[in-house]
Amino acid sequence: EPEVTQTPSHQVTQMGQEVILRCVPISNHLYFYWYRQILGQKVEFLVSFYNNEISEKSEIFDDQFSVERPDGSNFTLKIRSTKLEDSAMYFCASSEENFYEQYFGPGTRLTVT
Amino acid sequence: ELKVEQNPLFLSMQEGKNYTIYCNYSTTSDRLYWYRQDPGKSLESLFVLLSNGAVKQEGRLMASLDTKARLSTLHITAAVHDLSATYFCAVLPISGGSYIPTFGRGTSLIVHP
């Protein structure tokens, strides 16, 4: 069964450093998303992406964040200058239709020290 | 601002019993989602409810949506230990064509033998 994959599974970085989280969505999906979940808390939407453009972004997704689909398979989330409060699980998801059934990747645990 | 409230937040039940998790939301909604998350794992899409009166069932789980009451329920029938997980609802609002989902805090379900 096709699945969304994410790398790395765990990233430790120092405050102020840039990180890139990588995702490979399901190959025939057209819509891509990033979410985050601070430990033990609720899931928060960051951004959705379609046709090489951001479709929606939440208030969390400020100028420190960016997304890119650099080739036909990868979908990346970049955080330019990490803060302690960026520590969270980051989930990538993809779907065939806009915000219909989304398939989530296993997540990247980001720890900012 | 859209508010999504789930209750209960914690639920401990015995195998074989029935129970309902509630998801209330504060504004008109286009779609409502239910997800399952096992500890330390990603989210699994359970149901996507698209219209008033929608009811979907999968195994021992049944979800319904009442858009007039702004309420969705996730009913568990004859619980088994394998259903132990955290269940999230998420609401996608209609207003202004903005597709930014808001999640509830999650209901942590433990099913005891």
Image (cartoon, coloured by chain):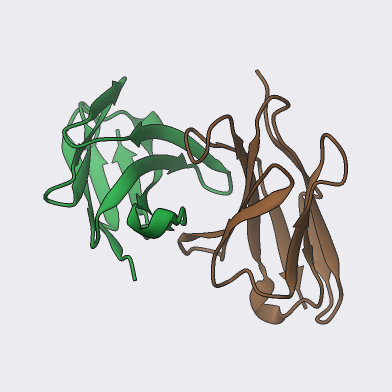
Chain colours: A brown, B green
| Image position of A31 (left or right of B27) | right
Q: Is residue B106 above or below residue A63?
A: above
Q: Say if residue B92 shows up in the picture.
A: yes
Give the quadrant of the N terminus of chain A. top right
Q: Position of residue A44 (x, y in %)?
A: 51, 61
Q: Is residue B33 above or below residue B25?
A: above
Q: Say if residue A47 shows up in the picture.
A: no
Extreme residue in the front direction: B96
Q: Residue at x 33, y 43 (%)?
A: B32
Give the quadrant of the C terminus of chain A. bottom right
| Image position of A18 (left or right of B104) | right
Q: How many marks?
A: 0
- Residue A80, quarter of the rendered image: bottom right
Q: Residue at x 67, y 48 (%)?
A: A107
| Image position of A59 (left or right of A75) | left
| Image position of A42 (left or right of A23) | left
Q: Position of residue B9 (x, y in %)?
A: 29, 58
Q: Is residue A86 above or below residue B43?
A: below
- Between A34 and A105, the one nearer to me in the picture: A34
Q: Residue at x 70, y 58 (%)?
A: A109
- Between A83 and A31, the one nearer to me in the picture: A31
Q: Position of residue B98 (x, y in %)?
A: 45, 57
- Residue B33, quarter of the rendered image: top left
- Between A39 and A77, the one nearer to me in the picture: A77
Q: Residue at x 21, y 42 (%)?
A: B73
Q: Position of residue A32 (x, y in %)?
A: 64, 43
